[in-house]
Amino acid sequence: MLRLSRWIAVVAILLSASVAFAQRPGGGQPGGRPGGFGGGGPLALVNNEAVQKDLALKEDQISKLKTLGESVREEMRTAFAGGFGGRDQSDEERAKAREKMAESMKKVNEKFQPKLDEILDATQRDRLKQISLQASGSQAYQNAEVIAALKISKDQQEKLAAVSKEHGDKTRELFGQGGGGGEDARTKLRELSESRDKALSEVLTAEQREQFTKMKGKAFDVAALRGGFSGPPGGGRPGQGGGGANPAGRPQRKTEGGDKKKDSN
């Protein structure tokens, strides 16, 4: 069984890859919410301090969101209690695991999104949607609202899904080779992401790219999202620090002497 830190990374990576399949032409999440937890969805973002400051939330709203976040985390613990298997799975088993994870994420989002909408006002909901699109990265291209607004053709959707799948395959291969940490792995992951983003952008027309920029609104510093992920138990995403995590996103633990020591994989 994978250690918790590595398991969280695998969950996030497989989920991001699954979005390309779940939201291909004819698919899509109800309501067009961008990417769920793995893609930087609203529920995963709204408890981040930088996001709350951007939204100009009031104290009573922040208090309600804290309570909501605790409920979301508890739901996630229940959803992922049994894990999703190990490294020795077949391709078919991994595909089923991705579908199971995507479905679990979808159910959590559908349950708690209305509660989030009740806490925020219309202006805050619109701005959170903009930030979510920015945080979703490549997954934003699979968003139902984005597809409709940009008039992305079926041919373009298929090309975008193919690019995302290729990136997901290469990322899983990187982690499968033990590339879950270290500067070299982070550099390779960054290079893969840059290559993917360039390929995705080239699928769109200049007009579509301009429209997409407008949909994302005022630029938000997504680097400020580090440490604000309200995802699976333990928090954190690959390459990002969570609460009590080092820069590589791996949980730290204290020794008996009180000094922090990096957790081994």
Image (cartoon, grey):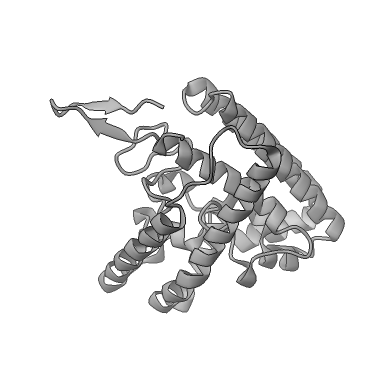
Q: Nearer the viewer, residue 27 or 120?
A: 27
Measured as percent of width and height from the top left, residue 208 is found at 76, 58
Measured as percent of width and height from the top left, residue 97 is found at 60, 48
Q: How many marks?
A: 0
Instruction: Say whether residue 214 is visible.
Output: yes
Instruction: Say whether residue 205 is visible.
Output: no
186 left or right of 191 in image: left
Q: Nearer the viewer, residue 93 or 241?
A: 93
Please name the residue shown 64% across and 61% down the image.
214
132 left or right of 165 in image: left
206 left or right of 5 in image: right
Please name the residue shown 86% across and 55% down the image.
155
Please name the residue shown 75% across and 40% down the image.
199
* Quadrant in the rendering for residue 207: bottom right
151 left or right of 223 in image: right
Q: Nearer the viewer, residue 161 or 218?
A: 161
User: Is the residue 140 above or below the residue 129 in the image?
Assistant: above
Measured as percent of width and height from the top left, residue 132 is found at 53, 58
Q: Quadrant of the C terminus?
A: top left
Measured as percent of width and height from the top left, residue 247 is found at 39, 32
Which residue is situated farthest in the top direction here?
184
Which residue is situated farthest in the right direction here?
155
User: Is the residue 15 above or below the residue 25 in the image?
Assistant: above
